[in-house]
Image: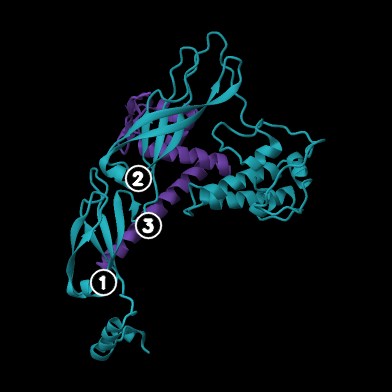
Amino acid sequence: MARKTITGVLLDERAELSLTDLSRACSTSTEWVIELVHEGVLEPVGQQQTHWRFSGTSLKRARAARRLQHDLNINLAGVALALDLIDEIETMRERLRRFEINDET
Amino acid sequence: MDFKDYYKIMGVARDASQDEIKRAYRKLARKYHPDVSKEADAEALFKDLGEAYAVLKDPEKRAAYDQLGAGWKAGQDFQPPPDWDAGFEFSGGFAGADAPPYSDFFESLFGRGFTSAQRDGRQAGIHVHGEDHHAKVLIDLEDAYRGAARSISLRAPELDSTGHVSTRLRTLNVKIPKGVKQGQRIRLAGQGSPGIGKGQAGDLYLEIEFNPHSLYRVEGRDVYLELPVAPWEAALGATVKVPTPDGPVDLKIPKGTTRRRKLRLQKRGIPGEPPGDLYVELVITLPPAESDTARQLYQKMQQDLAYNPRSKLGV
């Protein structure tokens, strides 16, 4: 049987997901996502909640937050701290790589 | 089926207290959590750990597991003895909908009945939005350069007319756009679980993951290649053919290259805004001294070049 090829939306740094989209994608409530925003873990575009738009990066972060909270039994402030530290390590690894490149060329 | 030593996985003694088990779990969970750990097999280790903890934290399951005896070794072929669980009662329902499936070993002991109870939403007047699904899709690096179509098989749980859960194999043809990065997601609207009542179907999110490549290493949109070069190419300079995921190119090796170094080929990484770069790491390799000619050439270099690679070591 010939199947039709479906095309999806590539989620990147542009903000395209609504609050409802994001909470559904994390199998969680909108309240939980709102808490993440208040905690500074997610930074949506748009002033009012009804107009919030989240990026693909937010989706990745929110799902990581969900897993950390569930698996390690830590509260949202702890999750926020862990995610910031993970990001910082990633940035430092990136800089280290660039530094090594400049050193050798 | 392989026997799993849950005590060994958790690094605790067989007579460890429930408190010790909990502490060991917390500590290892932080270490191997796939969102935290950079270790390649973190995901597998974390899954094993979760399974071990699911058994050892529960006194009933732990007692049943202990009854199998201490004679088993991890990886040993295992079949549960008949009636091994007689006299034990398990209280189920600990796995959430998102929880990873446990191993065959676990399921042979404790059954499949522990996976989450299905909601029965087929009552009149209820409209529920279908659940979103998440899946990983493996592509080759070349697919990210050119775009591709991938056929993806998904196992989706389905509620049949009698209310039983069965898994249905579903195949989708999905377009992978050019320029995708590792970890990026594609959202396919309406391809998740069907809704209940007038509820809309959920969405399917595909996470892009690259197959390991024999030549290239990928970081973000940047691509790395190790390129072996002969000593004379490095010393005298040369133009050599270099593979790239987009097809071979000619690369100029600068003369006077004496050790490992990286060259950057701008915009030859994964396409995008901005495109990534391709880094070619030059690795000087030596011809083997297996023939008389080769040995004579090395001896001539030894006599004529007065080269001491350790001159900076102070010896």
How far apart marks 3 and 2 lie (CA) works out to 28 Å
Q: Which residue is mark 2?
A: B140
Nearest the viewer among A32 and B57 is B57
Q: Which chain is cyan?
A: B
Which residue is pictured at 66% across the width and 32% down the height?
Answer: B114
Marks 1 and 2, Cα distance to the nearest angstrom?
Answer: 30 Å
Q: Residue at x 49, y 50 (%)?
A: B36
The answer as to whether the residues below labels 3 and 1 share one chain is: no
Which of B71/B177 is in front? B71
Res. A92 mark = 3
Q: Which residue is mark 1?
A: B230
Chain of the residue displaying label 2: B
Residue most toward the top?
A: B124
Q: Position of residue B26 (x, y in %)?
A: 61, 49
The spot of residue A13 in percent (x, y) is 31, 39
Residue A43 in view: no
Q: Which image quarter is the N terminus of chain B in?
A: top right
Residue sitting at x 73%, y 52%: B72
**Which residue occupies the extreme bottom position in the image?**
B303
